[in-house]
Amino acid sequence: MADRLTPDLQAAAARLATASSVVVYSGAGVSKESGISTFREPGEGLWAKYDPMQLATAEAYARDPGFVWSWYMDRFGLIDEAAPNPGHRALAELELLVPLTVVTQNIDGLHQRAGSTDVIELHGSAHRFKCVGERHTGFTMADFAGSDEAPPRCPRCDDLIRPDVVWFGESLPTAELERALELAARCDALIAVGTSGVVYPAALVPATARQHGAALIDVNPEPDAFAAAADWFLQGRGGEVLPRLVAEVRRVHGS
């Protein structure tokens, strides 16, 4: 595989090395390499027993907030135990070589923990909370350290607190999506990694970059929705391909 990929990888790296603006569009496959099950995959504990698509909704939370809260706390506990993988670290390194923004569908914060400084979270964050009325936001678990309630209540309005993540049936955060699309429209290159490319409206980000003439680099173990339109399809896991890609960009830079 390495020999077959080398020409495409070198060409993709050469394009990245001269880019004045790069967007990385990352999906669940990147986090999977850190041991975080993708949302639709069977996992352990609560994830093995219940369908997340039936629980990750405002209706489910209103119906049984205690259970849904415990389900998310189980999920977030797994996230806290995870560590950035070589793919995350390679992208943080690439930011030191070219101007780069990560647009991610993931909620785990692993890009930031790896060292990426400009990350747009389209689906929210496992580390932020808000009241169900969305009048008060930006809470962390530290804000409820003294509470015995599960879920806790908002200290400002007494509404129930919920995870600040996008549930099924909810819109993506407007400011984050608008900034992601703006960056995509003017970037020179976009790297899509670990994503199927079929979840909209998030998938508008790579589509917008392509429509405005950006080079598209697709990194995935198997061909996905972007592969046919990509300038370079680099087959493999992000943790394997991205370090090689970034090493080649560094070589081209002579650093």
Image (cartoon, rainbow, N blue to C red):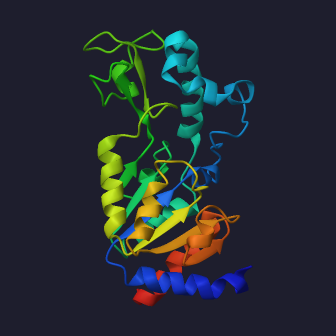
Left or right: 34 with respect to 123? right
Note whether 50 is above or below 42 in the view shown. Answer: above
Note whether 2 is above or below 136 in the view shown. Answer: below
| Residue 88 vs residue 107, the one in the foreground | 107
Residue 238, position in %: x, y? 60, 64
Quadrant including the N terminus: bottom right
**Residue 185 appears in which quarter of the rendering?**
bottom left
| Residue 151 vs residue 27, the one in the foreground | 27
Residue at horizontal 45 percent and vertical 34 percent from the top: 165
Residue furthest to the front in view is 211
Residue 120, position in %: x, y? 37, 51
Is residue 250 visible in the rendered image? The answer is: no
| Residue 123 vs residue 148, the one in the foreground | 123
Note whether 76 is above or below 55 in the view shown. Answer: below
Q: How many marks?
A: 0
Residue 54, position in %: x, y? 62, 24
Residue at horizontal 46 percent and vertical 14 percent from the top: 151
Residue 154, position in %: x, y? 32, 15
| Residue 123 vs residue 34, the one in the foreground | 123
Residue at horizontal 54 percent and vertical 78 percent from the top: 231
Is residue 110 visible in the rendered image? The answer is: yes
Quadrant including the C terminus: bottom left
Left or right: 76 with respect to 205? right
Residue at horizontal 55 percent and vertical 48 percent from the top: 199
